[in-house]
Amino acid sequence: MAKTDNDGRIKQWIINPNGDFQNLGINKNSIYKAKFLTGKYFLLTFFPFVEISFIIDNPPDNHYHIPLLLSNYSYTTYRGS
């Protein structure tokens, strides 16, 4: 869980109460999903939320850049560098 800053970036994830990342069960070659509550961002929107499913194929300490470009009535995403 996380909240984006004014630039739309996540600086820190809310992992769990004790901050332990390992107990989340993050494994490589697993499918994960990020859900963006776009209805809370836009006053009027066609998509109340956007879900992006992706595969983590490297250890979880690697950096993942998944841009989400959106407007009230469209969105697109890709794996960034």
Image (tube, rainbow, N blue to C red):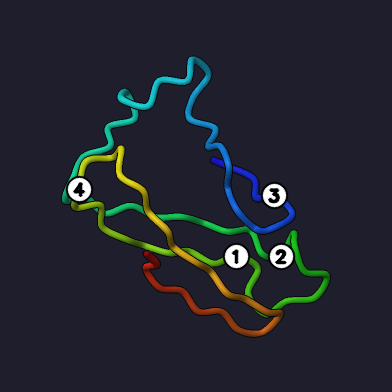
Amino acid beneath label 4:
Asn
Element assignment for label 3: loop
Mark 1 in CB contact with mark 2 (< 8 angstroms): yes
Question: Which is nearer the N-term, disc 1 or disc 2?
Answer: 2
Neighbour tally class for label 4: few under 14, some 14-19, many 20 plus, Cα within 10 Å: few
Q: Amino acid at mark 2?
A: Gly
First in sequence: mark 3 vs mark 2 = 3
Label 1 vs label 3, nearer the camera? 3
User: Which of the pair 65/32 is nearer the observer?
Assistant: 65
Dots 1, 3 in contact, CB < 8 A? no
For marks 1 and 2, give the CA distance: 6 Å
Which residue is painted at 28% across and 37% down in the image?
26
Residue holding disc 4:
58
Which disc is residue 49 wearing?
A: 1
**What whole-number distance in Å separates the C-alpha atoms at marks 1 and 3?**
18 Å
Is residue 18 shown left or right of residue 22?
A: right
Residue 57 location (% of width, % of height): 19, 52
Residue ID for mark 3: 5
Nearest to the observer: residue 12 or residue 54: 12
The residue where tag 2 is placed is 39
